[in-house]
Amino acid sequence: MIKSMTGFASLARETGTIVVSVTARSVNHRYLDIQIRSPQVLQTLESDVRDLIQRRLTRGRVDLTISVEFKRRPAVSVDVDDELMKALVDAANRPDVVDAVTGKWEVGDLLRFPQLVTVSESPRQVDEMLHVEQEVARIVEEAVAAVDEMRLKEGEFLQSDLSERIRLLSGLVKNIEQTAGESDDSLRERLTQRVDELAPDLGTNGAVVVQEVVRFVARSDIHEELTRLRAHIGHWEELVEDTAACGRKLDFLLQEMNREVNTIGSKAMGAETSKLIVSAKSELEKLREQVQNVE
């Protein structure tokens, strides 16, 4: 069963002291391109999130946005360098300093010294962040699974449309083979008849002319191209039933089928055959448009 590359999911979950919101969106892309936007506090989780997405999806551009709202501020530990504080106060009370400045030192003045106060994670904050990361990972996995499910459902519609179009193409190939064969027989008969009519006037050159006629008819033969085209169609039908991602393989097969149809168009004769070839090219173009969204 094939999958589309288009999917969307938006989830919000409230758990403990946090509210986690995750939005995941995927669109067509030649490869798997993952873009993650998350708060600074979750940067360490990005590698795990990428691994999670890669286990689920193989192609497409995936945009993932994570936001976390804390119901209360995370616990922190504040340490003050007492010796530095004493040194600063002593310096401020020196006569030369008192003469140079007016007013008292405020807390804000002291905080301008980055070495004075150190804010770090408390043991409780470490536990809280571990809980946050676990919850975010769980909700991200849920969102990616929802995107994958949507891609699978859309893939069902894609597969139905692709199967119908490849069926139409297969029918056109059969008709091309039939009409081209009739045209070849008619052409061969007319050429043979014309050579016979001209034989008395050709003299010793008659054999050469006959050989050229044979070569011309041989160059117009499209049986090899039709055989390869049928083989490509058979391979296509096998691929779309496969559970693995097959978008790139289908795209390659379309290129090969286009090449065969173009070659047939340059060789085949007859108005009816030409019409069928135009229809075949039209179906191939419709297939190409749809395959762009196959994973």
Image (cartoon, helix red, strand yellow):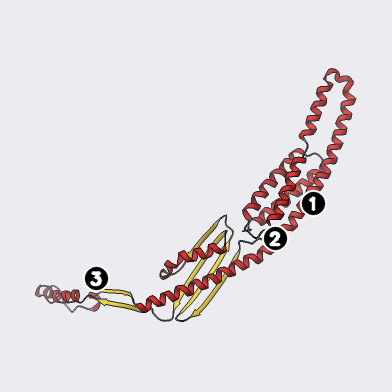
For residue 89, which quarter of the picture? bottom left
User: Mark 2 or mark 3: which comes first in sequence?
Assistant: 3
What residue sits right under mark 2 in the picture?
Answer: 159
From what the image shows, is residue 112 above or below residue 3?
A: below
Q: CA distance from mark 1 to mark 2?
A: 18 Å
Say which element carries label 1. Answer: helix
In this view, the residue in front, 127 or 74, is 127
Which tag is nearer the camera, tag 2 or tag 3?
2
Q: Spatial distance from mark 1 to mark 3, Cα to Cα?
A: 81 Å
- Residue 62 falls left or right of residue 157: left
Dots 1 and 2: beta carbons under 8 Å?
Answer: no
Residue 183 location (% of width, % of height): 84, 39
> What's the amino acid at mark 3?
Gln
Task: Please give the name of the residue rendered at 51% of the width and 61% of the height, measured from the top-left corner.
Answer: 34
Identify the mark nearer the N-term, 1 or 3.
3
Instruction: Please state which amino acid type lies under the numbered disc 2.
Output: Gln
The residues bearing labels 2 and 3 have C-alpha atoms spaced at a distance of: 64 Å
Q: Is the C-beta separation of discs 2 and 3 under 8 Å?
A: no
Residue 270, image x, y percentages = 82, 40
Amino acid bearing label 1:
Gly
The quarter in which the C terminus is drawn is bottom right
- Tell me the number on the disc at residue 218: none
* Image coordinates for residue 134, horizontal then vertical, percent: 47, 73
Between residue 224 and residue 95, name the one nearer to us: 224
What label sits on residue 171 in the rendered view? 1
Above or below, 7 against 271 in this view is below
Q: Is residue 286 visible?
A: no
Residue 81 occupies which quadrant of the picture? bottom left
Disc number for residue 115:
3
Q: Is residue 33 left or right of residue 191?
A: left
